[in-house]
Image (tube, rainbow, N blue to C red):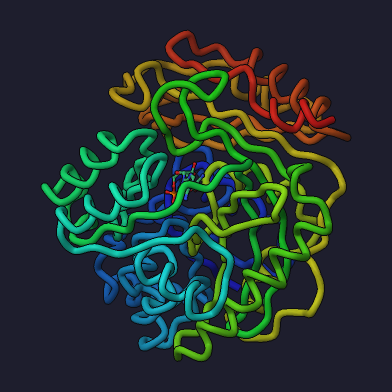
Amino acid sequence: MNVLLIGSGGREHAIAIALAKSPILGKLFVAPGNPGMAALGEPVVLDVADHAAVASFCHLMNIDLVVIGPEAPLVAGLVDDLASAGVKAFGPSKLAARLEGSKGFTKDFCRRFDIPTAAYARFSDASAAEAHAREKGAPIVVKADGLASGKGVVVAMSLAEAEAAIDMIFAGGFGAAGKEVVVEEFLPGEEASFFALCDGRRAMALASAQDHKRVGEGETGPNTGGMGAYSPTPIMDAVVSDKVMREIVAPTLAGMAEMGAPFKGVLFVGLMIDAKGPKLIEFNVRFGDPETQAILPRLEEDLLALMLDCVEERLPQRAARLSPLTALSVVLAAKGYPAAPEKGSEIRGLERAASMPFVSITHAGTRRAGEKILADGGRVLNVTALGADVAEARARAYAAVEAIDWPEGFYRRDIGWRALKRA
Ligand code: AMP
Ligand code: GLY
């Protein structure tokens, strides 16, 4: 089978590594890919927003499956347009992608299908939203309705902060994503993520993971796309995972099918867990970044075959086969990230680090210049290692990080601290 993989980050590099192991893979194309993926797939230049152009490329190159990494093309309906052109794609339709594309839609959906989540109200003007926040009191959470590259959420510890967030969003702080606002109850607890493959009716539990969103050690400083992740997370034992499959994933699939928008692809369930059990914080309709870099090295079966099962609606009724090992992934970012990462510095020692046992390296924001690899983004590399437990995976990952010579980069030294505290 020929596959076109869309995306350019560490997540897509990890997907490419997994796809390359598949015995049914013919040729892999990546649009646009990154320098780390060059040995795995042929890079192609495509305007992903031009769905007809993507479909033409697929016809020309006999692509049997398109795998879409990021959310924006899914929310824009790329899967639907490819399907109309007779091209199979792994991921949800435009209607099903509303589970990530609209927070208001998802909250109403949860209410209708009795899925445990924070209490909420939706608003289309600032004064009503602020009156509601005053009535409920702080802490309270303010969210822009639409896609805002993971930045559309303010956890307000005071009423003044909540009001400022509401004003900022309605003043256009998140662009069109902020035409509507969700104000919701603050949930205490520990966050975790859970991933399930879905074929529209059936779901297969894939794995749990936990990431680190703040840029600084000890969860300090601004939010980022994620500074590291590990899988599994000890907070999601078999009991909690079963509960998430039963109380969140199953009713979501049933509800979406009932609404005429069956969900296919990977459902990323963002959770808050406390003594009362798991509650949904948000859905994403694609793999997480950097969670995927920690999950896929544990997968002990053919990712491409599973993706095809999702698209062709014949997912086996069992959990995915995963290694019992723990994987831990550390993000190396360019100094200045997230506000103003410095681009262009040279990274050395990558081959040495990548050849260490149990280690894999994925590129997230690099550029090739002749023989050199240069930093070309905020999050630049992911260094992932497998180990018998979090401590071993972490020791191996940091040993490989130390082998990389990149003075202009930085990383958090405490990835996995919550899991270690529990051990
Ligand atoms: P989201 O973009 O929905 O993942 O939200 C970003 C972050 O805000 C989450 O990872 C949580 O840390 C936090 N958050 C979102 N909703 C809530 C909530 N209801 N209670 C507490 N924290 C929340
Ligand atoms: N790591 C969070 C995300 O992919 O949205």
**Residue 149 appears in the figure:** no
Rendered position, 158 above or below 183:
above
Residue 269 rendering spot, x and y as whole percentages: 58, 59
Compared across the picture, whether 94 is left or right of 404 comes to left
Residue 372 rendering spot, x and y as whole percentages: 44, 22
Q: How many marks?
A: 0
Q: Quadrant of the C terminus?
A: top right
Q: In this rendered view, identify the residue nearer to me: 283 or 243.
A: 243
Residue drawn at point x = 58 percent, y = 65 percent: 116
Residue farthest front in this picture? 135
Rendered position, 222 above or below 404:
below
Quarter assignment of residue 308: bottom right
**Residue 66 appears in the figure:** yes
Rendered position, 394 above or below 128:
above
Quarter assignment of residue 278: bottom right
Residue 341 rendering spot, x and y as whole percentages: 33, 22
Residue farthest top in this picture? 407
Compared across the picture, whether 418 is left or right of 105 comes to right
